[in-house]
Image (cartoon, rainbow, N blue to C red):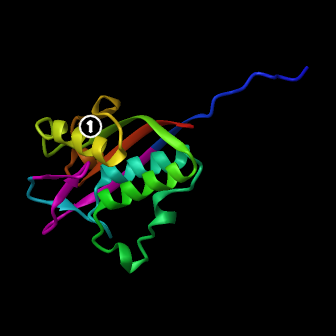
Amino acid sequence: MEDTQIIPDFRTGLGYDVHRFAKDRELWLCGVKVPHDEGLLGHSDADVALHSLCDALLGAAAMRDIGYHFPDTDPAYKGADSRVLLRRVVELIREERFMISNVDVTIIAQAPKLISHIPQMIVTLADDLGIDAGRVSVKATTTERLGFTGRKEGIAAMATVLIYRK
């Protein structure tokens, strides 16, 4: 017997990224400049949170990953603002008729403390994603001094998203 039920096109995506700390770099997380004595090392501005979010969105839409679309071997992306990359990813998934339902980003860092920056991160993400701030979650956690993030060698981030096709 054939299933005649129409299945809605809901998709989830998961993104993960890591960058190590480096001297003489600014620290950008979720598109917000965070005061810290070190930034993150990367070809672009190394916004680990936005990179994980881009991967989650692209993965949900089955459109490969951030490295495919914005390779670190391309000089055009040297020092790139990751907010520009995120907005381009949103354009790419919208070209495929996907809409963003919600996003959830977790930043894993022993330092710096991020609680006071999270409200601005939410507003910034909502603006770049073109969705209501109530559909954006940003959280920060530590690893209780375990691993590379616990030793303050870098920051990791994970993102999950729900998208749907119009």
Secondary structure under tag 1 reads: loop
Q: Amino acid at mark 1?
A: Thr
Specify the principal SS of the magenta part. Answer: strand
- Place of residue 81 in the rendered image (x, y in percent of width and height, measured from the top left): 28, 63
Read off the residue under disc 1. Answer: 143
Residue 130 horizontal side relative to residue 115, left or right: right
Residue 147 horizontal side relative to residue 116, left or right: right
Q: Quadrant of the C terminus?
A: top right
State the residue in front, 113 or 134.
Answer: 134
- Place of residue 39 in the rendered image (x, y in percent of width and height, measured from the top left): 18, 60
Residue 8 horizontal side relative to residue 92, left or right: right
Q: Which residues are magenta?
A: 15-34
Q: Residue at x 31, y 38 (%)?
A: 106
Q: Residue at x 30, y 41 (%)?
A: 126
Q: Is 135 placed above or below 148 here?
A: above
Q: Does 29 appear in magenta? A: yes
State the residue in front, 46 or 124.
Answer: 124
Q: Does 127 appear in magenta? A: no
Q: Quadrant of the N terminus?
A: top right
- Place of residue 4 in the rendered image (x, y in percent of width and height, measured from the top left): 81, 23
Picture quadrant of residue 91: bottom left
- Place of residue 14 in the rendered image (x, y in percent of width and height, measured from the top left): 47, 41
State the residue in front, 156 or 1.
Answer: 1
Disc 1 crowd, CA 10 A, few/some/many (<14, 14-19, 20+): few
The single residue placed furthest to the bottom in the displayed view is: 75
How many discs appear? 1
Q: Residue at x 15, y 62 (%)?
A: 26
Q: Residue at x 31, y 32 (%)?
A: 137
